[in-house]
């Protein structure tokens, strides 16, 4: 069950604002955005959530949906048409940005709503927020879920086609934002380095709003889990290649959504390795059910190649979801993930290499796994959304006071 902080009614009245939360992704599956919207609503603000459908089930705030999310082909074509020209003409980024129908629609929605504040999720919502700032004086909170200018820096195609555009949009927006939020200490520091003079962003980690599960001992079979978006550069190929080397009592579940072509390639790899009987593919579950579903497993995998600054400083949802589910974790030895694993002694480290992954898995007996599972639950009690959300509420308290002066 969600573990929201309840705020006194008299304090709610003092910080009431009209807050537009903009997210150019699928709203129903973006757990960070849904936590943000519900926290601000419970803090007394009038919340309008704008993004792509379907709308989140049971939302207690207003939701306005944009036209259908573009197809993968249209997204790739848009990168070439709207983003690539910034390599030669940096000034084109802001003009070409508005060729996207969904962005123009979001701009019109905010102009009609006239928010006191805009919570802009990811770099691609910043021009929409800045338009609201120019039109009605809205405060802008930039919530950078990723390190935008490094998210795909391992890809030469992305660096050639998109980087200049992303940097132009983020560079203008981040300097005009009234507050910046980052998901990890490493990304916060990297943003200050990338944009000299930028005040250090606030840290708001991707902690789920679910209470920690009860401890579950390991059964006859040790269940290993990777959940989240299934895509390249997440170590999935190395994980599958390691399975033939695992002890016979370990099984793997891959749970999440994926592009059809990529999912087919993973399944083909599984069959070619002869591990079809040891690997399950399961669809993604709604954000509210992620921790409950994860609790059926024993070990959670969060392995990222150190191929970019974005990966190096990652502190993803899945790590905190594994902790709340009471799983032992195996992560890459990357700084921000490693700090949590070492602090709570809740897991082990492995590079993205099949032999290394198998070595770590095979070194785990039931006694060690259960000890780490208990430590994960301890970590989850410390790293709760009830505590983390105080950063968000305090930020909007300050913006509310500024709005009224």
Image (spheres, grey):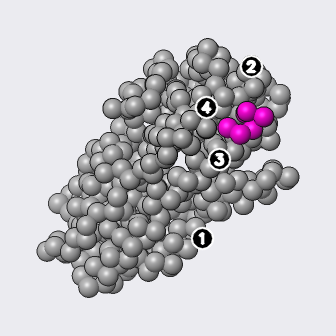
Element type at mark 3: helix
Q: Is residue 169 above or below residue 361?
A: above
Residue for badge 2: 135
- Front disc: 2 or 3: 3
Which range is magenta? 400-405
Q: Looking at the image, is mark 2 or mark 1 nearer the viewer?
A: 2
Q: Nearer the viewer, mark 4 or mark 2?
A: 4
- Residue 95: x %, y % from top left: 76, 21
Q: Does the magenta stretch include residue 227?
A: no
Q: Which residue is drawn at 59% across and 28% down?
A: 18
Name the residue that disc number 4 marks: 17
Q: Which of marks 3 and 4 is nearer the N terminus?
A: 4
Q: How far apart are marks 1 and 4 (CA)?
A: 37 Å
Q: Do the CB atoms of the residues marked 3 and 1 lie less than 8 Å apart?
A: no
Which of the labelled discs sits on residue 335, or is there none?
1
Name the residue at 46% across, 25% down.
Answer: 62
Foreground tag (1 vs 4): 4
Q: How far apart are marks 3 and 4 (CA)?
A: 12 Å
The residue positioned farthest toward the right in the image shown: 197
The crowd level at tag 3 (other Cα within 10 Å; few <14, some 14-19, many 20+) is some
């Amino acid at each position: 069950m969600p573990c929201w902080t309840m705020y006194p009614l008299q304090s709610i009245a003092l910080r009431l604002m009209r807050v537009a939360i903009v997210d150019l992704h699928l709203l129903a599956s973006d757990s960070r955005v849904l936590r943000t919207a519900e926290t601000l609503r419970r803090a007394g603000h009038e919340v309008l959530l704008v993004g792509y459908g379907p709308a989140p089930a049971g939302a207690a705030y207003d939701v306005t949906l944009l036209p259908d999310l573009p197809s993968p082909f249209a997204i790739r074509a848009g990168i070439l048409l709207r983003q690539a020209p910034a390599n030669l003409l940096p000034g084109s980024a802001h003009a070409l940005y508005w060729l996207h129908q969904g962005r123009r629609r979001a701009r019109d929605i905010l102009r009609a709503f006239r928010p006191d504040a805009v919570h802009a999720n990811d770099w691609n919502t910043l021009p929409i927020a800045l338009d609201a700032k120019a039109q009605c004086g809205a405060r802008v909170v930039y919530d950078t879920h990723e390190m935008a200018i490094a998210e795909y820096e391992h890809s030469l195609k992305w660096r050639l086609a998109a980087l200049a555009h992303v940097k132009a949009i983020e560079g203008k927006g981040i300097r005009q934002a009234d507050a910046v939020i980052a998901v990890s200490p490493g990304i916060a520091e990297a943003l200050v380095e990338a944009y000299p003079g930028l005040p250090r962003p606030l840290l708001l980690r991707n902690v789920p709003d679910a209470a920690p599960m009860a401890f579950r001992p390991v059964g006859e079979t040790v269940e290993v889990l990777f959940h989240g978006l299934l895509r390249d550069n997440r170590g999935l190929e190395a994980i599958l290649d390691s399975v033939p080397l695992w002890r016979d009592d370990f099984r793997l579940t891959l749970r999440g959504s994926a592009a059809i072509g990529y999912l087919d390639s993973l399944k083909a790899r599984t069959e070619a390795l002869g591990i079809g009987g040891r690997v399950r593919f399961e669809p993604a579950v709604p954000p509210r059910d992620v921790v409950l579903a994860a609790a059926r497993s024993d070990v959670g995998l969060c392995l990222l190649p150190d191929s970019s600054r974005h990966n190096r400083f990652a502190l993803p949802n899945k790590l905190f979801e594994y902790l709340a589910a009471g799983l032992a974790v195996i992560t890459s030895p990357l700084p921000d993930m490693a700090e949590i694993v070492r602090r709570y002694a809740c897991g082990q480290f492995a590079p993205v290499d099949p032999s290394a992954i198998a070595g770590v898995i095979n070194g785990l007996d039931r006694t060690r796994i259960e000890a780490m599972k208990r430590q994960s639950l301890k970590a989850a009690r410390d790293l709760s959304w009830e505590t983390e959300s105080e950063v968000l509420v305090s930020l909007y308290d300050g913006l509310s006071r500024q709005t009224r002066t």
